[in-house]
Amino acid sequence: MKIVVCVKQVPDTAEVRINPETNTLIRDGVESIINPYDMHAIEAGLQIREKTGGKVTVLTMGPPQAENALREAISMGVDDAVLLTDRSFAGSDTWATAYALSKAIEHLGADVILCGKQAIDGDTAQVGPEIAEFLDIPHIAYIRKIEDVKEGRIVVQRLMDEGYDLMESSLPVLLTVVRELNVPRMPSLKGKMAAKKAGIKKLTAADIGAEESKLGLRGSPTQVRNIFAPEAKRDRKIIDGTNEEIIDALVKELTGLKCL
Amino acid sequence: MFIKVNKDKCTGCETCLSSCPYDAIIVKDGKADITELCQLCRSCLSVCPEGAIFEVEEEADKKEKAQGSGVWVFAEQRDGELAGVSFELLGAGRRLAEKLGGEVSAVLFGGSAAGAEELIRWGADKVYHCDDGMFGAFNDEPYAGLLAELITQYRPEIVLAGATPIGRSFFPRVAARLKTGLTADCTSLDIDGETKNLLQVRPAFGGNIMATILCPHTRPQMATVRPRVMKRGEYDASRKGEVVKIRADNVKSRTKVIETIREVSEMSVNLQEANIIVSGGRGMGGEKGFQLLFDLAEALGGCVGASRAAVDEGWIPYRHQVGQTGKTVGPKLYIACGISGAVQHLVGMQSSDIIVAINKNPDAPIFSVATYGIVGDLFEILPLLTKKIKEVKGA
């Protein structure tokens, strides 16, 4: 079984804020991490390998420093790491990103492709399904359990708003995964040693045979026009007093507003 | 378009570095450079004291816009019932169509003839309805295949879907196939007065910043829209429209839904439909703390929500999660207990009519969106509040 896990290096977004006066970002001391959802995709890849045998390759598209994310994945136990990097990817939106990744996956070959359900910086959840479309293979999003996987067929649980769907798909397939799927393992000492020494395979646009017109800015149908701070609103009213007084006052206010 | 640095003007002062949300600016040999991480958000343009950062227009930017007319909304059904977001999309679609001229159409896969008529009463001029049995349960490939076919045939200018597990899963396939742009999880839509392009506003970085996205050259412009954010259209029982029956002849599926399992407990019902939500965060301390919330919710006849922190701790299942990575809610009353108020949570609940925040930390950001703030000990206040509500309701 050939398994490819797509990961993204993201800023630890809980720390990113915008300065409402200057409209610029405050990002002092923000670290880069592997997108948390992708950690679950890596774990899922490793678990499938343990069951069926085969090879897990972790793939990322990004600048040279994204290598750090790949080394972290190697320390968890993946077999191979591939960095897709090229200046021509600059300005890629989800469409152009998915196109480039799909060409890289074609180049590598895969039976199962795993992605986190979304990246915590962009939050679009679009790249996974778009990769599947470019590869002309099926996808299932929001996987919370992999019930069974064998040659040519997989059975999974897809998380929905009001429960889940038990689903079956032919292979190859692309799955995007949610946190409930598993608990990502900690890197082993051996893994950490391997990560230090491992060679990272680098692929460029030419290596994967990508069409120039579909890459980067030129290949991106969408553009970011501007960014701004979310507006804060509402005047609060603090209710003071003893606990009994507070509750009496609150219930009176809410009753007055016909909330109860 | 590209962002470039004029190396003659650049002094290497590094002022621009912190302006970039994507870490795309580096300073090398005393000069700034824009790397391939650049997303063209233009944040850096205004910050350079030397005016050394500028944008370059390309020939491709001026190319002719593709054609198309009318606004389409994808009307989602689950078990044959129309999802509420469908009516919100019709409201949003109608407002856009008024600015553009042209019709508002709904697309319904599965569902009933009565459902199609209902969409007309909620504001659709036309409904493209395919009632083929294969659309009963949601499968990405047939949904994407048939919608892409219809778009290619009828050429709408804008196509919207709800940012639900269904819309967010299959719309990307449609956009990829049609080589057009898709913007995820929009919270506001408008039309640019000059270019007539769709202005798509969405949160990014966990809700810490908002971005306006354009799809200037390709059509249709596609977006998924967050449920419970847009106002529904006006319901008019006498409204007339046309239902166009669609056949699904060339549609395939390599995935199959074997079984749909509902896991909704009586209490949790659908958070997004709830009038009253009692929500808890890290301050609840554990599952035991959440029991106090369930007691209060029961007394109020409401549902229990949770912050990501509480869900990540495993105190309550994910389907209760409110916020950027959970559900967006807009109840009449939202009681936030022991929730500090990370932006990621606030974006999911700040459109609630009345917000009550209870927290022991008077500086918690949750108080900035609260209608009523109470600084105090939850474990004392909640049981008293539950008791008082029961008294009031019993009276």
Image (cartoon, coloured by chain):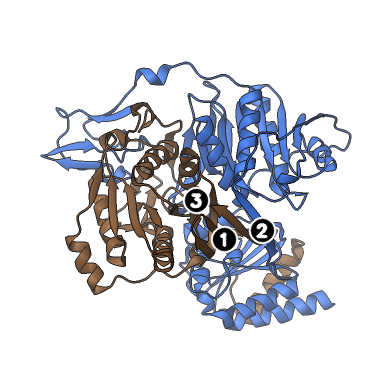
Q: Which chain: blue?
A: B
Q: Is residue B199 visible?
A: yes
Which residue is nearer to you in this view: A208 or B222? Answer: A208
Task: Give the residue at mark 3.
Answer: A173
Q: Looking at the image, is B197 positioned above or below residue B313?
A: above
Amino acid residing under circle 2: Ile
Image quarter hosting the C terminus of chain B = bottom right
In contact (CB < 8 Å): disc 2 and disc 3: no
Amino acid residing under circle 1: Val
Say whether disc 1 or disc 3 marks the residue closer to the N-terminus. 1
Amino acid residing under circle 3: Val
Q: Looking at the image, is B207 positioned above or below residue B231?
A: below
Label 2 CA crowd tier, 10 Å (few <14, some 14–19, many 20+): some
Label 1 CA crowd tier, 10 Å (few <14, some 14–19, many 20+): many
Marks 1 and 3, how far apart at CA: 11 Å
Label 1 in the same subunit as label 3: yes
Q: Secondary structure at mark 2?
A: strand
Q: Is residue B26 left or right of residue A176?
A: left
Q: Secondary structure at mark 3?
A: strand
Marks 2 and 3, how far apart at CA: 17 Å
Give me the chain letter of mark 1. Answer: A
Q: Looking at the image, is B218 positioned above or below residue A96?
A: above
* Residue B271, position as x, y percentages in the image: 67, 61
Label 2 in the same subunit as label 1: no
Q: Residue at x 74, y 76 (%)?
A: B389
Which residue is nearer to you in this view: B390 or B314? Answer: B314
In contact (CB < 8 Å): disc 1 and disc 3: no
Count of marks placed on residues: 3
Task: Give the residue at mark 1.
Answer: A155
Which label is found at residue B258?
2
Q: Which chain: brown?
A: A
